[in-house]
Amino acid sequence: MSGQNNDQWREEFAKRKANRSTSEDFLEPYFENIKNVSFAEVPFEISIPSMWWRSVYASTNGFAYESFLDELSHEAGKDLLAFRREYLDEGTHKLIDKLEEVSGWKKHKKNEGFGVAITECFESAVGHVVKVSKNPNGGVKIDKVWTVMDCGWYVNPDIIKAQVEGYVIMGLGAAAFHEIIFKDRKTEQKNFDAYPMPRINDIPPIEVFVMDNDEDAGGVGEPGLPPLASALTNAIFDLTGKRIRKLPFKLSKV
């Protein structure tokens, strides 16, 4: 896991220390319930300046952690949500119950791919279930996304749902559309006409559910982005048996 964004802004002596953001987005109960957990990073510097993206380290960390947990689930021969449930707490169990209920997780058919990812940052936990199927024109298509957010006490659910829909689209773009290519220290993309972004016909139906509880309020604007890419690639593995470990990729080429 690279700490390049923070490393560019840290003093030289601090670059030799562990980056505190390396474990960002890893759900807290895992630290208590998994006997052996180790995090490491490989700091490096690049000639192209970079800055923080939405949800900061959680974006890239979430893809790595939840993809790895999916692989562990398959190696253990266990249901993907049941496997996570073994290591998470009661609060997250309720989120998992809701994901199972709204997505019809236990009823999906042979030619449907279902993927899940659950992450936590800014004091809020979010789970996505993504459903995919084979596209008659080649590759795969996204049929639907279900999201359950637990942000504690809230006021306006419509604002939360609007934020969720936005970060599902942004996460989809990062996973399967956005790409800037550098050649001879210059970008090949000069404007938005050359920079692929999701269009309205690329956006699947999105259904959002907000958990009700009396916990302290958490963040809403960023926590839903990190789990999208891994939920999508986990769904693609469920359908095709192909692991995707590098982003972005093209849905039409899977």
Image (cartoon, rainbow, N blue to C red):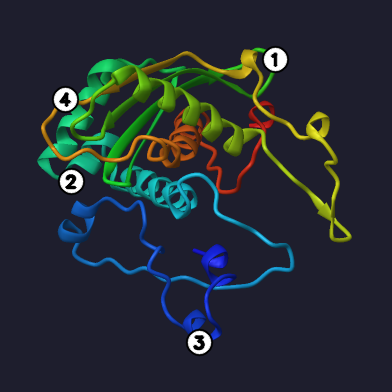
Task: Please tell me which of labels 1 and 3 falls first in the chain.
Answer: 3
Q: Quadrant of residue 159?
A: top left
Residue under the image location 50 percent in, 44 percent down: 54
Residue under the image location 22 percent in, 31 percent down: 96
Location of mark 2 (residue): 88
Task: Please tell me which of labels 4 and 2 falls first in the chain.
Answer: 2
Check if mark 1's residue and mark 3's residue have beta carbons within 8 Å.
no
Mark 1, other Cα within 10 Å: few <14 / some 14–19 / many ≥20: few
Location of mark 4 (residue): 212
Which percent across, then down, holds residue 72?
34, 49
- Is the residue 97 above or below the residue 39 in the image? above
Labels 1, 2: front one? 2
Badge 4 element? loop
Lateral position of residue 176 relative to residue 25, left or right: right
Badge 3 element? helix
Location of mark 1 (residue): 137
Location of mark 3 (residue): 13
Lateral position of residue 240 relative to residue 70, left or right: right
Check if mark 1's residue and mark 2's residue have beta carbons within 8 Å.
no
